[in-house]
Image (cartoon, rainbow, N blue to C red):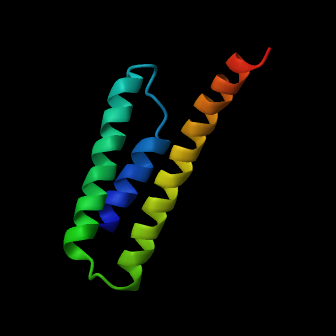
Amino acid sequence: MWEELNQLFLQTKRPAESGKRRPIFSFAASREGAHLFQGITDSTLSHSEGWHFIQAGRFIERASATAALLEAHVGELFEAVRF
C-alpha cells in the first residue's frame, strides 16, 4: 500500500522528460495509481481507526469538489438571471 502511494507521489512530481509525456497519459497514470491505492487499502488495511480516517478524508474531498462544482454552476446561473 505504501509502496503504491510513494510510487504515485514520485510519478506526479517527476517533470516531463523534454516534453515527451502527454498530459492525458499523466492523468491516466495518476488515476490508475489512486484506484490501486484505494483498492489495496480497502482489501489489506484492517477496518479500524486508520481505515475510517482514510474513508473520512475521501468523503470530505468528494464533498469539497461537489461544493466547488455547484458553486461554479450556480454562480453562472445567478449571473444569467440578474439584469
Q: Determine the image quadrant of residue 26.
A: top left
Of residues 55 and 29, the one drawn nearer to the viewer in this rendering = 55
x, y percent for residue 49: 40, 84
Of residues 8 and 36, the one drawn nearer to the viewer in this rendering = 36
Number of numbered discs present? Answer: 0
Q: Determine the image quadrant of residue 30.
A: top left
Seen at 27% across and 77% down, the residue is 45
On screen, residue 29 above or below 25: below
Which quadrant would the C terminus be assigned to in this image? top right
On screen, residue 48 above or below 56: below
Which residue sits furthest right?
83
Which residue sits furthest bottom?
48
- Horizontal side of 39 relative to 48 (left or right) equals left
Which quadrant would the N terminus be assigned to in this image? bottom left
- Horizontal side of 27 relative to 61 (left or right) equals left
Seen at 57% across and 46% down, the residue is 67
Seen at 56% across and 51% down, the residue is 64
On screen, residue 2 above or below 9: below
- Horizontal side of 10 relative to 77 (left or right) equals left
x, y percent for residue 11: 40, 44
Seen at 25% across and 69% down, the residue is 42
- Horizontal side of 81 relative to 2 (left or right) equals right
x, y percent for residue 46: 26, 82
